[in-house]
Amino acid sequence: MDRVRDKVAIVTGAARGMGAAAARVLHGEGATVFLTDVLDDLGCSMVNDLGDGAHYRHLDVRAEKEWHQVVDAVLETSGHLDILVNNAGIRIAGSTDTMSTEDYLKVVSVNQVGTFLGMRSVAPAMRAGGGGSIINTASSMAGLHGRPDSVAYTATKWAIRGMTRSAALDLATFGIRVNVVHPGLIDTPMTPGGVPLTGSDDPLRPLIDTIPAGRLGTPDEVARLVVFLASDDASYCNGAEFTVDGGWAT
Ligand code: NAD
């Protein structure tokens, strides 16, 4: 129950879905956690549920200024920063022949620029504290393969893989590890069709049938991998990619 005891974490997109699960499991394993999101009401109620050691701050990951404010608040409150879970993301459906430039750039600005700003914003604080762990979020289906009707989303998830490798090389010398997780199809509000998706008439049934595990993953199953990468158990894991997808990409 204390794999990240005394560590301080920022989780983006933590008001719901996988970010909320990562925040809850990190908190349960002893970390002080700063949940951040643009869904302030939901984020605050998560923090109320978690209790001591959980804080909420508004953070639109596209906004450099807000990143600085959050890092300053973390350092002021806790004195150090050890973990960043770059989880916030959006998916706008769009095919290569029809997607608008505006929608394409919206996805890039949250998923790709947001992930970069996160790494850049926390690096000085982690460096000053002697090291840290950054966990970026790509995707098994859209980051290891191509997806139809998802040109922007797929592009950003592949970009996050490249960014992770570059950042791992840039930051290793400061004791900062940077890794990327590839969730498969996970039961969250982002997954079309809502939850639970178990009946034979589910719109996602053909996709679920391609998953060797035969079901969607849960946010907690992803969170447990995130906590491993955040913890000192992963001290020699850097620049690496980890799938948590029920065997889909195998
Ligand atoms: P979700 O929609 O439930 O949660 C995403 C969170 O990000 C939300 O709380 C949302 O408010 C927040 N967010 C959106 N734009 C933001 C912004 N500009 N600034 C800050 N926060 C913002 O989705 P999820 O399924 O929990 O997705 C979490 C991550 O996992 C995303 O990066 C997503 O691309 C990735 N992912 C999801 C799946 C899946 O099957 N659900 C699979 C692979 C990867």
Image (cartoon, rainbow, N blue to C red):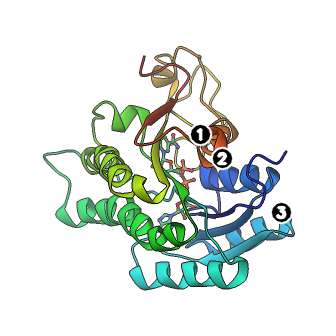
Residue beneath the point at 51% across and 19% down: 247
Placement of the N terminus among the 4 image quadrants: top right
Displayed quadrant of residue 142: top left
Q: Earlier in the sequence, mark 2 or mark 3?
A: 3
Q: Which residue occupies the foreground of this view, 113 or 200?
A: 113
| Mark 3 CB within 8 Å of ligand 1 | no
Residue that badge 3 annotates = 50
SS for callout 2: loop
Q: How packed is label 1: few (under 14 Cα within 10 Å), some, or many (20 or more)?
A: few
Q: Which residue is mark 1?
A: 234
| Alpha carbons under labels 1 and 3: distance apart | 25 Å
Q: Which residue is mark 2?
A: 231
Q: CA distance from mark 2 to mark 1?
A: 6 Å
Q: Give left or right: position of 90 versus 189.
A: left
At label 1, which amino acid type do we have? Ala
- Secondary structure, mark 3, is helix
> Amino acid type of disc 3?
Leu
How far apart are labels 2 and 3 at the CA level? 20 Å
Chain-order first, disc 1 or disc 3: 3
Q: Residue at x 78, y 55 (%)?
A: 5
Q: Position of residue 170 (x, y in %)?
A: 33, 56
Disc 2 residue type (three-letter): Ser
Task: Identify which residue, 160 or 145, lies in the foreground.
Answer: 160
Task: Find residue 227 and report its horizontal and vertical position in percent.
Answer: 66, 45
Q: Considering only vertical position in the picture, is 120 above or below 166?
A: below
Q: Quick one: label 3, few (<14), some, or many (20+) residues within 10 Å? A: some
Image quarter where the C terminus lies is top left
